[in-house]
Amino acid sequence: MAESDTPTPGKLLPDEIHRAVKPGTALLRLQTTHFREGILDGAWWPRSRDVTAELPALIEVLTTHLGPIMRVGLDTAAWDDVPTRVVVDDRVVHLDSFPVGDDTALITRGENDHFALLVVPPDTTPDAARDAMARAVDADNVTQAADILVATLPEPATEREESG
């Protein structure tokens, strides 16, 4: 690891991560302990709200690090045409509809082994997405996904600002 990639106090992620994060990125904080102190286990920044286009890549990454993924829980109101299952690498992954909010995805690896990911909206600016994702993977994070997004995403322009 290059010196610039070593985390420093006050910095949550190495510099290289900040340059590499772009739409379609997933950041994970995987702990090998039986207890998880933080609320979120990672973050995902999909490129779109097309779950059939976005989810397979996330499942592939998660499977590499966690083992086979059985289920993904999403708030279907936040996604376009959510099927009941997707097939990734010849494995069926069931999609569950949960009113968890469009800011969270729940990943199930085993019977009672769940991981929660912050979902960064696809149209988020790179700087805001990096900030939100860094907060989500901070091991000491106790902030809910929705609150992270409120704190890190720019406020939408008002109608007066947009018109001129």
Image (cartoon, rainbow, N blue to C red):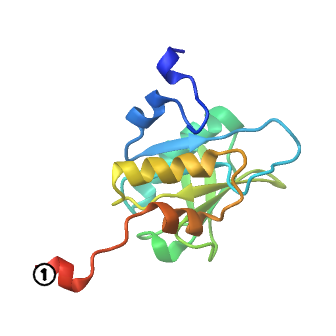
- In the rendered image, the vertical position of residue 147 relative to residue 5, given as above or below: below
- Residue 39 visible: yes
Residue ranking furthest to the top: 2
Q: Position of residue 41 (x, y in %)?
A: 68, 49
Of 15 and 109, nearer the camera is 15
Please report the residue visible at 72 percent of the width from the left and 57 percent of the height from the top. Answer: 39
Of 58 and 89, nearer the camera is 58
Residue ranking furthest to the front: 9
Please report the residue visible at 48 percent of the width from the left and 50 percent of the height from the top. Answer: 131
Q: How many marks are shown on the rendered structure?
A: 1
Left or right, 157 with respect to 162, comes to: right
Q: Position of residue 5 (x, y in %)?
A: 51, 23
Amino acid on which the number 1 mark rests in the picture: Ser
- Residue 89 visible: no
Residue ranking furthest to the right: 34
Residue ranking furthest to the left: 164
Where the N terminus falls, by quadrant?
top right
- In the rendered image, the vertical position of residue 54 relative to residue 50, given as above or below: above
Left or right, 73 with respect to 81, comes to: right
Q: Where is residue 70 in the image (x, y as percent from the top left)?
A: 70, 51
Where the C terminus falls, by quadrant?
bottom left
Q: Residues within 10 Å of mark 1 (few under 14, many from 20)?
A: few
Q: Quadrant of residue 68?
A: top right
Of 123 and 37, nearer the camera is 37
Please report the residue visible at 85 percent of the width from the left and 39 percent of the height from the top. Answer: 33
Please report the residue visible at 40 percent of the width from the left and 63 percent of the height from the top. Answer: 49
Q: Name the residue beneath numbered marker 1.
A: 163
- In the rendered image, the vertical position of residue 133 relative to residue 60, given as above or below: below
Does dot 1 land on a helix, a strand or a loop? helix
Left or right, 46 with respect to 70, comes to: left
Q: Position of residue 82 (x, y in %)?
A: 49, 68
